[in-house]
Amino acid sequence: MTDQASGGVTASLLTRLRRSDEVTDSEAVRLAGAVSRMESFAPRATVCRAHVPLDVSKLLIDGFVSRQCTLLDGRRQILAIHVPGDFVDLHAFALKYLDHDVVALTTARLAVVPHEQLREITDSEPHLTRMLWFATTVDAAIHREWIASLSRSAMARVAHLFCELRARLEVVGLADRSGYALPLTQIDLADATSLTPVHVNRTLRQMREAGLLDFRAGRVEIGDLDGLIRLASFDPRYLYLDRTAR
């Protein structure tokens, strides 16, 4: 890829990392240079399949991608939702394969970073290595919060997911207090919150009638962000958005 193109595709990642710590220009150039190519995926296409050896990791540029597994009865469980600026499988650099599938929820565009390039970064760029490690550990923190969310009521669980996605998308300039684009289905929301689609539909209606938000036509329109945060008991500290030298 050209320097201009590779720099463009890593812009959202750099925005995310710089929210938490300083990333120098030379580190940004090094990260951009690690991108080998771009790949595009249609909705529901598999980005990475479980238990298949991997020698690359992928950075989400546009769209939404999930980590998910299929249960024995055929039901899908969404384990994580990735937004632009996220590596969807950086932990595969150490693990060498995934124990779950990575699937595009929408049309998605991803930058491919060979593990050989990541190996060179870890050998020569200690601070950048710590920042990539930081991004991976935040993924783990989000996963823990999703587990904790299972103890919330259905309404609070859905509200918490909307609050989290708003906060994460705001970091990369894709959301504000009034709302954000979210081209997912109610079935996607159900599989991400361990609820039935009927329960999610009822919950969304209750939230709309309460003036909290309206989710339709691929967009979340927030009517009362403070009320939504209170309903969800949303505390963003698990996203580690504070700026701290690492």
Image: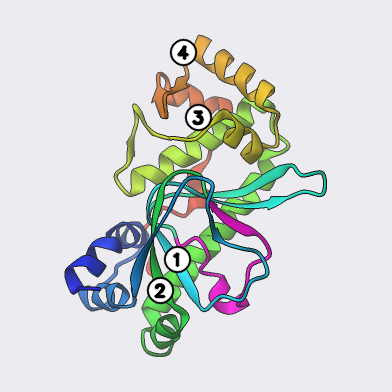
Label 1, on which residue?
A: 58
Contact between marks 2 and 1 (CB within 8 A): the answer is yes
Q: Horizontal placement of 174 versus 164: left or right?
A: left
Residue 218 x, y percent position in the rendering: 42, 29
Label 4 secondary element: loop
Mark nearer the N terminus (2 vs 1): 1
Label 3 secondary element: helix
Which of 243 and 129 lies nearest the eye of the viewer?
A: 129
Q: CA distance from mark 2 to mark 3?
A: 36 Å
* Part of the protein shown in magenta: 87-103
Mark nearer the N terminus (3 vs 4): 4
Q: Nearer the viewer, mark 1 or mark 3?
A: 1
Task: Residue 211: give its label.
Answer: 4
78 w.r.t. 20: above or below: above
Q: CA distance from mark 2 to mark 4?
A: 43 Å
Residue 92 part of the magenta-drawn span: yes
Q: Horizontal placement of 207 versus 76: left or right?
A: left
Residue at the image position 56 percent from the left and 14 percent from the top? 205
Residue 139 part of the magenta-drawn span: no
Most extreme residue toward the right is 72
108 w.r.t. 217: above or below: below
Label 3 crowd bin: few (<14), some (14–19), many (20+), radius 10 Å: some
Label 3, on which residue?
A: 229
Residue 56 x, y percent position in the rendering: 48, 75
Which of 11 and 237 lies nearest the eye of the viewer?
A: 11
Label 2, on which residue?
A: 113
Which of 177 and 121 lies nearest the eye of the viewer?
A: 121
Mark nearer the N terminus (4 vs 1): 1
Residue type, mark 4 in image: Gly
Q: CA distance from mark 4 to mark 1?
A: 38 Å
